[in-house]
Image (cartoon, helix red, strand yellow):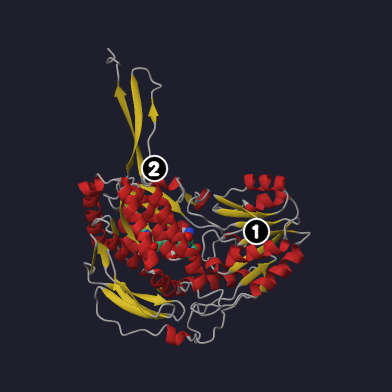
């Protein structure tokens, strides 16, 4: 299958509601996508008339142009979201119906599954394995899970105070701004909107500028599913304009963000200096993955390879720092290097490929910069370390070889900073105390893993790790029903599970007088 035929583009029309993109080989259908800004259930052109280009990272070529939102579009979207939030249809909505809307969206996504997967692959460079086996079912599962929660968010009652009873109501927060990244565009869109809608909020969401397509497709399905106008609004565009306008808006009640720690910090400042909107942040990581000598080494090799190969390292919880006990260091490194070397890098539409292009030129250059810094700091490249040559790509896509650094020192940049690519560092350790200290020696705290068969050690290590998610004998496994989020500078708050409902509800306490006289 050649890159050229698969990614050949039709001539793009001037702005129109939809643009046809590609013929999907899976179901032999044309895949198309709306290109406008989605406000009040309508796709419209941006108020400034500006557009921006969306690129296919497998070829470095533009796919199409879409409408580019700015501050004035955000204002319009917030107005629509506020009106919908206060309108009686949504304000008094039966939670069962909100659950039905989420379920209907899940069903429509299942109907258009192959189109959504193809769009996600085209826009991000993901393999089908990643998009179809993980991101898509994760998205649909999340929708159905929060559909089930919609009518189960209850308050508490207290009859323990003489002369009064008190109860709490869980009320929606209001208009929720949501800003999502490019590494999981579909999944993050769904992770963000599902708990917000289940609990009766309205949403203004911004997709990442590098990967806006599946969010546009989902908005079309949101309308078809029967969501009232203004409940979900999408403004495509850039962080400095659209993202900044959402974070600073005086009429946005809450902002939920996933992305870099640097941008998370900016958003927190914006919230503080505007209306003190509530903030939840899911940020970066530099997660440790610890291998003890009593582990099943072959299984540990497999999970550790997946720890970096999932989404080609562009995963906030990627296992980028592997610590191997000295007794099995040589054995592990040899088997791991062999496993990583067996990963096939290439065109992401080729089903035999394990690793497609990195998401964008910016990320590609950033990763190559880190590889260079590792070399200069004196770490040893045990595998890769170069641009990957891919047949048919004519040197144009953003392909990087799976890369392993050994002889890495704790203070090297590659050991401290988030690389967000197929690059892993391996270090050796002797004792539990030493490895716990090194594993926790990071400003991040998103995830961590331990591989061992000793159940007492499992408890010592998992208790000692400062990370929001800790895996035992596995890596990179996240389920929508279990809370996800970070310690330290990896974030504030938890998404997924019941925990996310906290983010989208205010608790109101009501005291009901049953016989207390006013104090004199
Ligand atoms: P970013 O954090 O700048 O982008 C994430 C989202 O925030 C995008 O939608 C972007 O448009 C928006 N944004 C950017 N600046 C903003 C601002 N001032 N106000 C409001 N929104 C803003 O991340 P970027 O630049 O795409 O990637 C840089 C690095 O961040 C990556 O190499 C990776 O290390 C990390 N990252 C981590 C992610 C995670 O899942 N934790 C996801 C994406 C990136
Ligand atoms: Mg793209």
Q: Quadrant of residue 213?
A: bottom left
Q: Point out residue 66 in the picture as x, y percentages from the top left corner.
A: 30, 73
Q: Point out residue 284 in the picture as x, y percentages from the top left corner.
A: 50, 58
The numbered mark, 2 or 1, whose residue comes first in the sequence reads 2
Number of numbered discs present? Answer: 2
Residue nearer the viewer, 28 or 296: 28
The quadrant of the rendered image in which ligand 1 is seen is bottom left
CB of residue at label 1: within 8 Å of ligand 1?
no
CB of residue at label 2: within 8 Å of ligand 1?
no
- Residue 46's label in the rendered image is none
Residue nearer the viewer, 116 or 438: 116
Q: Residue furthest right?
A: 327
**Residue sitting at x 51%, y 68%:** 130
**Residue sitting at x 25%, y 53%:** 81
Task: Determine the secondary structure under disc 2.
Answer: loop
Mark nearest the camera among 2 and 1 is 2
Q: Is residue 332 above or below residue 151?
A: below
Residue nearer the viewer, 419 or 273: 419
**Residue sitting at x 20%, y 46%:** 88
Task: Determine the secondary structure under disc 1.
Answer: loop
Instruction: Judge from the rendering whether residue 230 lies leftward or rightward of residue 4; answer left or right.
Output: left
Instruction: Judge from the rendering whether residue 289 lies leftward or rightward of residue 179; answer left or right.
Output: right
Which of the image's four quarters has the C terminus?
top left
Q: Point out residue 202 in the picture as x, y percentages from the top left corner.
A: 29, 52
The residue at which mark 1 appears reads as: 410
Q: Residue furthest top?
A: 520
Q: Quadrant of residue 75?
A: bottom left
**Residue sitting at x 76%, y 57%:** 293
The residue at which mark 2 appears reads as: 152
> In this rendering, does residue 300 appear at all?
yes
């Amino acid at each position: 299958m050649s890159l050229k035929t698969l990614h050949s583009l039709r001539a793009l029309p001037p702005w129109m509601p939809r643009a046809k993109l590609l013929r999907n080989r899976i179901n032999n259908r044309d895949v198309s996508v709306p290109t406008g800004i989605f406000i009040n259930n309508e796709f419209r052109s941006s108020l400034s008339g500006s557009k921006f280009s969306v690129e296919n990272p497998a070829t470095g070529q533009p796919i199409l142009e879409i409408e580019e939102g700015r501050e004035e579009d955000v204002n319009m979207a917030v107005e629509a979201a506020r009106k919908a939030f206060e309108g009686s249809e949504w304000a008094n909505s039966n939670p069962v119906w909100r659950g039905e809307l989420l379920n209907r969206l899940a069903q429509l996504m299942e109907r258009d599954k192959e189109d959504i997967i193809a769009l996600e692959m085209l826009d991000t460079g993901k393999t089908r394995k990643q998009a179809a086996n993980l991101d898509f079912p994760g998205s649909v599962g999340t929708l159905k899970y929060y559909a089930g929660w919609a009518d189960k968010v209850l308050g508490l009652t207290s009859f323990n105070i003489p002369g009064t009873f008190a109860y709490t109501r869980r009320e929606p927060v209001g208009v929720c701004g949501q800003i999502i990244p490019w590494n999981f565009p579909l999944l993050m869109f769904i992770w963000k909107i599902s708990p917000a809608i289940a609990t009766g909020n309205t949403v203004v969401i911004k997709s990442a500028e590098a990967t806006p397509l599946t969010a546009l497709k989902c908005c079309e399905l949101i309308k078809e599913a029967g969501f009232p106008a203004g409940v979900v609004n999408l403004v495509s565009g850039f962080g400095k304009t659209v993202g900044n306008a959402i974070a600073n808006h005086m009429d946005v009640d809450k902002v939920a963000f996933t992305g870099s720690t640097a941008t998370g910090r900016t958003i927190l400042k914006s919230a503080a200096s505007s209306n003190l909107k509530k903030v939840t942040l899911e940020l970066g990581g530099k997660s440790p993955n610890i291998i003890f000598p009593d582990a099943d080494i072959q299984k540990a090799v497999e999970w550790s390879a997946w720890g970096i190969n999932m989404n080609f390292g562009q995963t906030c919880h990627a296992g980028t720092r592997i610590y191997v006990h000295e007794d099995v260091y040589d054995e592990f490194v040899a088997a791991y290097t062999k496993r990583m070397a067996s990963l096939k890098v290439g065109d992401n539409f080729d089903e035999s490929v394990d690793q497609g292009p990195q998401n964008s030129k910016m990320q590609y250059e950033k990763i190559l910069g880190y590889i260079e810094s590792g070399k200069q700091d004196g770490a040893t490249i045990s595998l890769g370390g170069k641009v990957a040559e891919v047949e048919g790509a004519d040197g144009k896509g953003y392909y990087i070889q799976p890369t392993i650094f050994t002889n890495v020192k704790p203070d090297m940049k590659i050991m401290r900073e988030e690389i967000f690519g197929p690059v892993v560092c391996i270090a050796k350790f002797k004792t539990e105390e030493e490895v716990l200290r090194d594993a926790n020696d990071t400003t991040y705290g998103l995830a961590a893993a331990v591989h061992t068969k000793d159940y007492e050690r499992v408890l010592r290590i998992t208790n000692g790790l400062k990370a929001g998610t800790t895996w035992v004998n596995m890596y990179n496994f996240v389920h929508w029903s279990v809370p996800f989020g970070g310690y330290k500078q990896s974030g504030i708050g938890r998404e997924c599970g019941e925990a996310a409902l906290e983010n989208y509800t205010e608790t109101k306490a009501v005291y009901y007088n049953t016989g207390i006289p006013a104090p004199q």
